[in-house]
Image: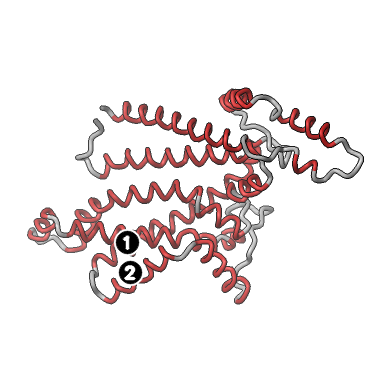
Amino acid sequence: MSMKSYIAKRLLHTILIAWGVMTAAFFLMRIGPHSPADKYLATLGAGHNVSQVAAAIESRYGVDRPLYEQYFTYITSLLHGDWGWSFSTSMPVSDLIRTHWVYSFQLILLSSIVAILLGITIGIFSAARKNTTADHITTFFSFAGISIPNFWLGMMLILIFSVKLGWFKTYYDTGLPMFSLSNLYALILPVMTLATGMMAGYSRYVRSSMLENMNKDYVRTARAKGLPESIVLRRHVFRNALLPVVTIIMLDMSGIFFGGAYITEVIFGIPGLGWMSLKAVFSDDYSVVLAVTLIGAFVTLFFNLVADIAYTYLDPRIRYE
């Protein structure tokens, strides 16, 4: 099977899986006990006909129609680029996504760069110094980084460096440009929070994979030829050790979207998709929750596809049948 055929097949699978995720999320949200009218009814005083107000609100958002009709209407609108209407903000969901996604992207991008660069570097350093004091120290801190929940780490960083020492501010100023020095400075603690666990995991995988490849015949042959150890590690061991690490990194890129990034945004007040989706969940804002769920599904499937394609460049022996 050619690469183009494989990609086309995977894209078809991506669409089918995303449709399944969206369908499940749609029906799970709709069979819940709450209605978009609930938050409006809670503010009404005496003298209002509650049933009429509820009926008018539900009619406005189309949730008074049969469930199958709501589903097909949503699918049709989605195919035309209409993500629906936010109940809680009275805004198109597409406008909300355009407003908030850049903040999530900035946090995830910076955290991923820090985690990948430091994690791989520490892993190589640790493998090259197996069973030394330096290896034991990096191993200890790696296991500590993997074990500490990022929400707890974030709160401790705020308590120590913001509250006690006053070195960092604890809010993100949306009135300033995204990559302004002030906001980049405000992102230091969130990036540390999000990158620590990933960095620790990458360093352990890189170390383990490097040590496994160091015992292979081709490495002994390279050393027998008199090549310097630095060249053996860089040209021979590292490239082959990178293959399983790519899988972990790609899976983390998708997992970080739904996991750590959302929690970190809430802790540090960063107005990204995580912050937006949390508000939507508590407001029973169906359309926003569905949109974020669908985006997360596409991100997960996309990075899985990227990982599969990257394999062929890292290991020419892999072929897609």
Image side of residue 237 versus residue 171, left or right = left
Residue at image x 59%, y 62%?
186
Foreground residue, 282 or 102?
Answer: 282
Foreground residue, 157 or 233?
Answer: 157
Image side of residue 301 versus residue 278, left or right = left
Which numbered disc flags the more N-terminal residue, 1 or 2? 2
Quarter occupied by residue 284: top right
From this view, report whether residue 206 is shown above or below residue 89.
below
Mark 1 crowd level (few <14, some 14–19, many ≥20, 10 Å Cα): many
Q: Kindly state the secondary structure of the residue where label 2 is placed.
A: helix
Quarter of the image with the C terminus is top left
Q: Kindly state the secondary structure of the residue where label 1 is placed.
A: helix
Residue 203's spot in the image, x, y percent?
Answer: 34, 61
User: Which amino acid does the dot numbered 2 rest on?
Assistant: Thr
Residue at image x 57%, y 66%?
155
Do callouts 1 and 2 mark residues in contact (Cβ within 8 Å)? yes
Measure the C-alpha gap from mark 1 to mark 2.
8 Å
- Any part of residue 188 in sight: no
Residue 32's spot in the image, x, y percent?
Answer: 63, 39
Mark 2 crowd level (few <14, some 14–19, many ≥20, 10 Å Cα): many
Colouring rule applied to residues: secondary structure
The residue tagged 2 is: 139
Residue 36's spot in the image, x, y percent?
Answer: 72, 38
- Which dot marks residue 204? 1
From this view, report whether residue 236 is shown above or below residue 38.
below
Foreground residue, 115 or 148?
Answer: 148
Residue at image x 37%, y 31%?
10
Quarter occupied by residue 75: top right
Residue 292's spot in the image, x, y percent?
Answer: 56, 41
Residue at image x 11%, y 60%?
223
- Which dot marks residue 93? none
